[in-house]
Image (spheres, rainbow, N blue to C red):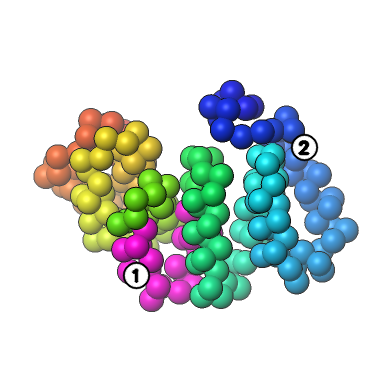
Amino acid sequence: MEAYMKNNFSFFGIKTTPRRAILKELWKIHKDEIKQNSRAIAWELFSKNEREFHYCAIEILIKELKKLYIKEDIKLIEKMIVIHSWWDSVDTIAKYLLGNYFVQFPEETENVISNFSTSDNMWLNRSAILFQLDYKANTDAELLFFICEKFKDSKEFFIQKAIGWALRDYSRFNPQGVTEFVSKTDLKPLSKREALRNL
């Protein structure tokens, strides 16, 4: 597991299914405490070394904060994106935490995404590209295309891949729009290939 993650993290070696079973049992026992202190508990877990703790932290917040975000949660979300950063955590945080935060506070989207997309942190950039993955037909196409255009010249693999993934996902709901955007935008080959994979 450590090798798969390029030795960026320590692992206990507990696979996803048994790890979630353990968390589920502990969640039952400490249900009230977790509900009342979900942010603090999640951050405590996320601050530990082993990767399994990070996954548990993210899963706790996805469930406990749904439709119950406060505006200050963006600070916690940002910290979790830039600390212990790798695609496995960042992509889940971007799609489920950041994405759902903006569903509750759409008025925050422009300012936060502007900050993320102008940051020197590549993982914040990637999150700005991917946060609409679960939006389906409600995707803000103008914003998606703007962000993809902004990063089209990036030489970073994780950015090129994110552009392609975001466009491919949206192509299920607006194939013509994605096709037209790709045709008129000088995307990197990886981004273009990923974007058009299902078209």
Circle 2 packing at 10 Å, graded few (<14), some (14-19), many (20+), is few
Give how far across and how far down residue 9 sits, in percent: 61, 34
Q: Is residue 156 above or below residue 129?
A: above
Q: Is residue 150 above or below residue 191?
A: below
Q: Nearer the viewer, residue 191 or 81?
A: 81
Can I make out residue 60 in this image?
A: no
Q: Nearer the viewer, residue 36 or 49?
A: 49
Can I make out residue 109 in this image?
A: yes
Give how far across and how far down residue 77 sits, in percent: 53, 60
Give how far across and how far down residue 134 sits, in percent: 45, 55
Seen as rendered, the residue at the extreme right is 29
The mark that comes first in sequence, 1 or 2, is 2
The quadrant of the rendering that contains the N terminus is top right
**In percent of the image, x 81 and y 63: which residue is there?**
31
What is the magenta range?
92-116
Apparent side of residue 15 relative to residue 25 in the rendered image (left or right): left
Circle 1 packing at 10 Å, graded few (<14), some (14-19), many (20+), is few
Q: Which secondary structure class fits the magenta region best?
A: helix
134 inside magenta stretch? no
**In percent of the image, x 79 and y 43: which residue is there?**
21
Q: Secondary structure at mark 2?
A: helix
Q: What label does residue 26 carry, if any?
A: none
Residue kind at label 1, given as amino acid type: Asn
**In percent of the image, x 55 and y 69: which residue is there?**
73
Q: Nearer the viewer, residue 56 or 179?
A: 56
**In percent of the image, x 41 and y 52: which residue is there?**
124
The quadrant of the rendering that contains the C terminus is top left
Residue, disc 2: 18
Residue, disc 1: 111
Apparent side of residue 16 relative to residue 196 in the rendered image (left or right): right
Apparent side of residue 181 relative to residue 29 in the rendered image (left or right): left
